[in-house]
Image (cartoon, rainbow, N blue to C red):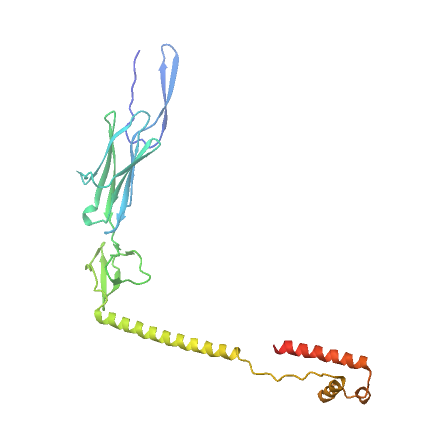
């Protein structure tokens, strides 16, 4: 009985169902066997293709373990040289895949190049994938101490663009060329002593003016309050003590103009008029108060 073997070489990027068919013509027998192949190795390295100087980026290496093979080591190299162990690698697993994240912080020109992620498995097989990181021709806006940037300034200036900043009492213009600035400004002078004294003097004047306005407002309110609580005296109204005085008062006030009513001695009529007058006095007193 003969044994037939075959091998699948990396890269295989997805699960494969393989069917083998054996024809035994002398016996007239056809035998088939099916097996699902789960590949293992480095699937890919993802990350930005271009990057600006001063930026921070991540490159991620995705390693698949397969059926029975587990990863023993994952290493990163750049332009053929192995990277140091203290570069801040982060590794974690999700299902049968392992992720190795390589951070590149505050990019400099030396960080550009060809990155290779290699994974070695228990059976001794080594798989690798690469990613080329090139410098962008755009420029990242630098962080300059005490600089005044335009309000609508973004984080990146395009190739052959310019950046205008206020630096102390001067205006500085720098140009982006092929991913680098034509000049480097690290800091701007802070607020000068003369300007600081002027600012303090202006604040003192404003505070004095506010205090004066507040004092005037308080005095004005006090005068208004004093006037409102000291009403002018009101003349006392004379109350009729008798029917004759009441009738006389009615005549003086013009309430009785009929001679017949003036000469009446009907007590009911007089008492009714007297009650009405008292009611009117109470209403007038309530309104005046």
In the picture provided, is 145 more to the left or to the right than 224? Answer: left
Residue 150 drawn above or below residue 245 = above
Q: Residue at x 32, y 75 (%)?
A: 205
Of the pair 198 and 250, the residue shown nearer to us: 250
Q: Where in the figure is residue 24, as x and y percent of width and height? A: 36, 13
Location of the C terminus (image quadrant): bottom right
Q: Residue at x 76, y 84 (%)?
A: 243
Q: Where in the figure is residue 17, as x and y percent of width and height? A: 37, 26
Q: Residue at x 67, y 77 (%)?
A: 282
Image-quadrant location for residue 29: top left
Residue at the farthest top position: 27
Q: Where in the figure is residue 189, as x and y percent of width and height? A: 21, 64
The mark tally for this picture is 0
Residue 103 drawn above or below residue 240 = above
Of the pair 167 and 1, the residue shown nearer to us: 167
Residue at the farthest left position: 81
Of the pair 112 and 153, the residue shown nearer to us: 153
Q: Where in the figure is residue 152, as x and y percent of width and height? A: 33, 61
Location of the N terminus (image quadrant): top left
Q: Residue at x 66, y 79 (%)?
A: 284
Image-quadrant location for residue 266: bottom right
């Amino acid at each position: 009985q003969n044994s037939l073997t075959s091998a699948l070489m990396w890269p295989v990027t997805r699960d494969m169902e393989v069917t083998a068919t054996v024809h035994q013509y002398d016996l007239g027998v056809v035998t088939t066997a099916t097996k699902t192949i789960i590949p293992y190795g480095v699937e890919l390295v993802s990350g930005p293709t271009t990057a600006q100087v001063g930026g921070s980026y991540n490159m991620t290496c995705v390693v698949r373990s397969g059926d029975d093979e587990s990863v023993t080591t994952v290493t990163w190299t750049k332009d053929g040289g192995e990277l140091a162990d203290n570069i801040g690698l982060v590794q974690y697993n999700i299902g049968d895949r392992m992720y190795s994240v390589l951070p590149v912080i505050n990019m400099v020109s030396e960080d550009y190049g060809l990155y290779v992620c290699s994974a070695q498995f228990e059976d001794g097989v080594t798989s690798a994938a690469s990613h080329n990181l090139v410098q962008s021709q755009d420029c990242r806006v630098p962080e300059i101490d005490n600089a005044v940037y335009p309000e609508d300034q973004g984080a990146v200036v395009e190739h052959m663009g310019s950046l205008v900043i206020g630096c102390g009492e001067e205006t500085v213009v720098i140009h982006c060329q092929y991913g680098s600035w034509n000049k480097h400004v690290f800091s701007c002078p802070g607020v000068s002593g003369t300007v600081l004294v002027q600012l303090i003097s202006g604040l003192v004047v404003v505070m004095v003016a506010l205090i004066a306005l507040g004092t005037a407002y308080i005095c004005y309110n006090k005068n208004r309050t004093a006037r409102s609580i000291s009403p002018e005296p009101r003349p006392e109204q004379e109350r009729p003590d008798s029917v004759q005085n009441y009738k006389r008062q009615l005549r003086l006030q013009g309430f009785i103009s009929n001679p017949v009513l003036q000469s009446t001695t009907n007590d009911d009529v007089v008492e009714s008029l007297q009650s009405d007058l008292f009611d009117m006095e109470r209403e007038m007193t309530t309104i005046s108060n």
